[in-house]
Amino acid sequence: MKQLYTPWGEALDREHPLPEYPRPQLVRNSYVNLNGPWTYTVEDGEEYTRRRTGTITVPFVPECLLSGCDFQLHSGETLWYERAFTLPEGFRRDRVLLHFGAVDQSCTVRVNDAVVGGHEGGYLPFTLDITDALRGGENRLTVAVRDLTDGGPHAYGKQKYDRGGIWYTATSGIWQTVWLESVPQKYIRRLRLTPDFDGRLLRWQVEADDPAGAHMVVRMNGTCIAEDRADEEGCGTSLIREEYFRPWSPEDPFLYTVEVTLGEDRVESYFGMRKFSTVEHRGRRVFALNNEPYFQSGLLDQGYWSDGLYTPPADAAVVHDIETVKTMGFNMLRKHIKVEPLRWYYHCDRLGILVWQDAVSGGSPFLPLYTQYLPFIGVPIGDKPSRRLGRADEKGRAQFERDLKGMIDLLYNCVSLCLWTPFNEGWGQFDAGRIAAQIKVLDPTRPVDHASGWHDQGGGDVQSRHVYYKPVRLKNDGRRVLALTEFGGYSLPVPGHCAAEKEFGYRAYRSAEAWMDAVEKLYREQVHPWIDREGLSAAVYTQVSDVEEEVNGLMTFDRRVTKMDPARMAAINGLLTF
């Protein structure tokens, strides 16, 4: 792979990378960032022999440029991280919590040689109470990581040891911010914020050991517009009077702020007043935003970076991606087979772009006959747990359902998140109809695309189609929203900005002008007509940026070149309305 730095990675402060507060929807005035230089050692799992040692820049994975390491952790090896820390004077209250944004895949954590906990799964945050292991002065933090990638029950997404085409470099270890906070003995663990658009209410719930009496204040541009106290279950409602009611949308992404106090604890958060649903429009079911039909034109977003791989090189890099696709007229991003750091969703909320959230796929290797060949010739199959879709292992299926619930709990408050997708193209798919119904119980406020691409089991809210290599032909089933959830993927390599010698795309071009003409023709002739003909309600073009061998992005992998003409693309997107 060629070394390609983004502008932000080139300017990285390795002593203080990604210093921003990592949890925007539960902000507390207590924060010590532990990103930066850590020491590391890799041990062989059988011989317990040191294979390598050195310094790594956390939270970048060892496989990426920004970590300063550039090695692949393999199954059977253990990656040991270590660093010292001293709590600032006056920092410690009753309890000290250690937070990890995400560690891929399994880890054990020690403070001063005492095991304080661990975690399984590479995509969700976890918190450990380390109070009893702390001592005065300097403390030592150690994290032991193992990663099976696609060799165990855990989700792994698009990671492969043998990368190529649509499969990318396997990543391991700490890949999101590590940080400390101090809290009183009685503290708020979680907020659940549910805007009731029709009722003009914010329904809220505080999760704590004893949440009764928690006090909520809602502010609009700094002015208090509502307040309430929680009942014994920690629940409350706050009325947003008509004069203060301002709907959230991509065109007007207005956010209210909230402050919640419980005893000595105080946190801040935010919400937007919006409603995601489906409605009847000209005899078809379509997506609606705030009760009005709303066409969603989006991009597939893999969330990979040429220098940070899974980890954005800087907060500003995330903002750049979102602002760039908005200038092109897109109003939605489909976050593909990855759960991002929470600041990514915060920027979508405040900048105004809808988010479709995929669950991260896993399971044993899929059989290409069932995930590639039969779907392309239109042969439907069932999705009972089986080896053909990589789901014969009961342990792996149970882990997927636990991870699914964890993801929904984590992202429930995200204002911009408007749709859940548990399965993509049969990768690890099983019981999709049942899983869709389960999601509706966990979150009744958002539609579900139960099987993106193919192996449709008739469930969920979306009739979902992926079309590559052939003309777009769609037929509405009359019951659900019709969505073109992947298409396009036309490739255009940009010399000097390609990460690999091999190139992958669904139709190749060498001229930027010919590529742009082809994309416009695709939208005008094969997307736009289906809005009137069959009630097409959404379209997701592949993709935001190039990724390794894939050169079908609207930007290069290093984000230094925007291939797409923003004004021309915005004009195309302007056609995609009901």
Image (cartoon, rainbow, N blue to C red):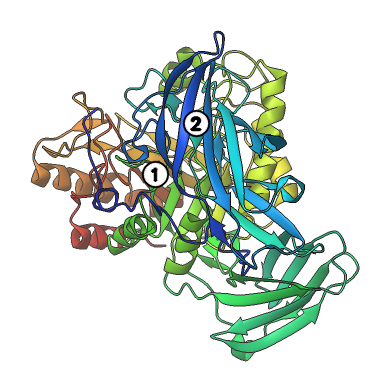
Q: Is residue 18 left or right of residue 108?
A: left
Spot the residue most to the right: 232
Image quarter of the N terminus? top left
Taking the spot 27% from the left edge, 30% from the top edge, the residue there is 506
Residue placed most toward the observer, 263 or 315: 263
As helix, strand or loop, the secondary structure at mark 2 comes to loop
Q: Position of residue 426 (x, y in %)?
A: 53, 26
Residue placed most toward the observer, 220 or 489: 220
Q: Position of residue 403 (x, y in %)?
A: 66, 37
Q: Are marks 1 and 2 in contact (CB under 8 Å)?
A: no
**Quarter where residue 406 is shown:** top right
Q: Which residue is mark 2?
A: 157
Q: Which residue is mark 1?
A: 300
Q: Is residue 57 left or right of residue 396?
A: left
Residue 119 showing in the rendered view: yes
Which of pointers 1 and 2 indicates the residue nearer the eye? 2
**Quarter where residue 449 is shown:** top right
Residue density around tag 2, few if under 14, some if 14–19, many if 20 or more, within 10 Å: many
Q: Amino acid at mark 2?
A: Gly
Taking the spot 21% from the left edge, 31% from the top edge, the residue there is 2
Figure check: 442 above or below 95: above
